[in-house]
Amino acid sequence: MSGTAFDPKMLEALVCPLTQGTLRYDADKQELVSEAGKVAFPIRNGIPVMLVDEARPLEN
């Protein structure tokens, strides 16, 4: 894992590109979770990768 930390204040400005809904920060997995879109976006080097192609589907 990288030493660069994600700034949770970024969540105020970011929305899910699929649903335009809110995101939840998962510090353990270093990703932003969209419950409505059922996907998780990775955070790499402290930067959220908000590309649908990079999102991980959530398990049911």
Image (cartoon, helix red, strand yellow):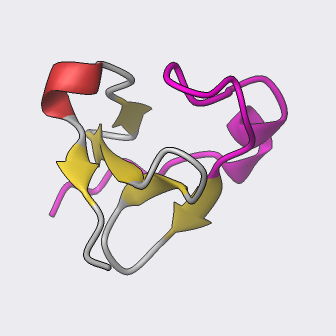
Residue 45 at x, y = what percent? Answer: 26, 39
Residue 18 at x, y = what percent? Answer: 50, 24
Query: Toward which corner of the image does residue 3 lie, by quadrant?
Result: bottom left
Q: Which residues are magenta?
A: 1-23
Residue 14 at x, y = what percent? Answer: 68, 26
Q: Quadrant of the N terminus?
A: bottom left
| Nearest to the observer: residue 12 or residue 36 | 36
Counting every numbered tag in the picture gives: 0
| Nearest to the observer: residue 17 or residue 14 | 17
Residue at screen point 41% across, 33% down: 48
Majority secondary structure of magenta residues: loop
Q: Is residue 36 above or below residue 47?
A: below
Looking at the image, residue 55 sits to the left or right of residue 47; the answer is: left
Query: Toward which corner of the image does residue 47 lie, by quadrant?
Result: top left
Residue at screen point 64% across, 59% down: 24
Is residue 29 shown in magenta?
A: no
Q: Is residue 38 above or below residue 13?
A: below
Residue 53 at x, y = what percent? Answer: 15, 23
Residue pushed farthest right? 12
Query: Toward which corner of the image does residue 44 lie, by quadrant?
Result: top left
Is residue 18 shown in magenta?
A: yes
Q: Is residue 44 above or below residue 47?
A: below
Q: Quadrant of the C terminus?
A: bottom left
Looking at the image, residue 41 sits to the left or right of residue 18; the answer is: left
Looking at the image, residue 41 sits to the left or right of residue 54; the answer is: right
Looking at the image, residue 23 sits to the left or right of residue 46; the answer is: right
Residue at screen point 65% across, 48% down: 23
